[in-house]
Image (cartoon, rainbow, N blue to C red):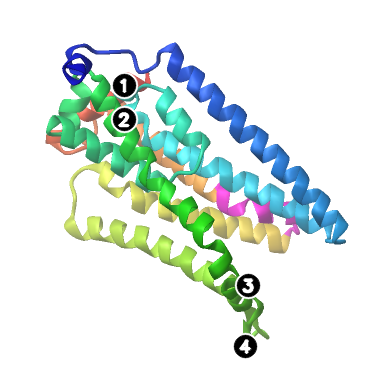
Amino acid sequence: MFAGLACAYTFNPDNGLMYGLYGGVIAIVAAMSVYYIATAIRRAKALGMDMGKIKKVITTSVSFSILPAIGIGVGMVALIGSIGIALPAIRLSVIGSLQYETMMANGAAAALSGSLEKFLASDVFPKHYVTIATVMTIPIITGPLVVLLGYKRFQPKVAMLSSKGVKTTRGGMNIGEMLFQVVFIGMILGYLADAVSILAADASYIDAYFNFIALVIAALCMYVFELLINKLKWKWLDSFSTAFSMLIAMAVVAVISYFAYDKGWPLVPEETAEAAAAAVAAFM
């Protein structure tokens, strides 16, 4: 009976309760952040650590916290018209991933209504809303759970691995740093492979090339920033170069997307034109 009632009416995904939940999440996350950063700084001072390095870590962490939030926000624009602002805002406030969030939300919407276009064009029901919220939220918890339950077991091995180094032509490199760089480069190559596959397919719509455009713009920006850091000694830029490069690339793609839709360029394939129109209407 309750399931039938839940599907019998539409509701407002941006009601006061959702914004109240959002406010509660923000308060908890902010309080935890302040507590742990204050505790960490006090401990660092007690150990006599270089506060210059501590400040660099903090500024880098801030930039890499803001950057994914912006990316996820851009990626969620297409669904704001149906699931509202509150749920994406809550997801932005805690752990998440642009690729995971958008993939799960789009997949759930397509499964519920047959296609993303139909979901965007229809009213949202409570059970649909709960389904999307569940697939966006529950699976991502597995990461923290693995750390919570297994950290004491694998942390000593990670610490031992990080303390080792390998010889290079420039003297040597810490294995921990090398692994981080390898993983990061692998992630970038994944995006590059996707972009190259679109180029090979000779797609006739402009948004198919957004990944490739973003990669090229980000690489050019990173090259310019490296010149500024090394030639002009802009050392402060070192902590923000990656974040700024990605933000500029996303901004360029956003501008291209706006003008593409505004000028009637072939932004998307014909069968997804309704979804693009609904997304733009929801955002305006």
Q: Main secondary structure of the magenta part?
A: helix
Residue 9 vs residue 103, the one in the foreground = 9
Secondary element under disc 4, as helix, strand or loop, is: loop
Residue 189 appears in which quarter of the rendering?
A: bottom left
Identify the amino acid type marked 4.
Lys
Q: Position of residue 224 (x, y in %)?
A: 59, 56
Identify the amino acid type marked 2.
Ala
Identify the amino acid type marked 3.
Ala
Side (left or right) of 72 relative to 104: right
Which label lies toward us, 3 or 2?
A: 3
Residue 242 in magenta stretch:
yes
Identify the amino acid type marked 1.
Gly
Q: Which span is picked out in magenta? A: 232-244
Tell which residue pokes out farthest to the front in this image: 1
Distance from the alpha carbon under mark 3 to that under mark 1: 46 Å
Side (left or right) of 262 relative to 253: left
Which mark, residue 81?
1
Counting residues from the start of the chain, the first of labels 3 and 1 encountered is: 1
Distance from the alpha carbon under mark 3 to that under mark 2: 42 Å
Counting residues from the start of the chain, the first of labels 4 and 2 encountered is: 2
Secondary element under disc 2, as helix, strand or loop, is: helix
Count neighbours of disc 1 (C-alpha within 10 A) and say few if under 14, some if 14 to 19, many if 20 or more: many
Q: What residue does disc 2 label?
A: 78
Count of picture labels: 4
Count neighbours of disc 3 (C-alpha within 10 A) and say few if under 14, some if 14 to 19, many if 20 or more: few
Counting residues from the start of the chain, the first of labels 4 and 1 encountered is: 1
Which mark, residue 159?
3
Q: What residue does disc 4 label?
A: 167
Counting residues from the start of the chain, the first of labels 3 and 2 encountered is: 2
Q: Position of residue 227 (x, y in %)?
A: 64, 61
Count neighbours of disc 4 (C-alpha within 10 A) and say few if under 14, some if 14 to 19, many if 20 or more: few
- Whether tag 1 and tag 2 are in contact, CB under 8 A, the answer is yes
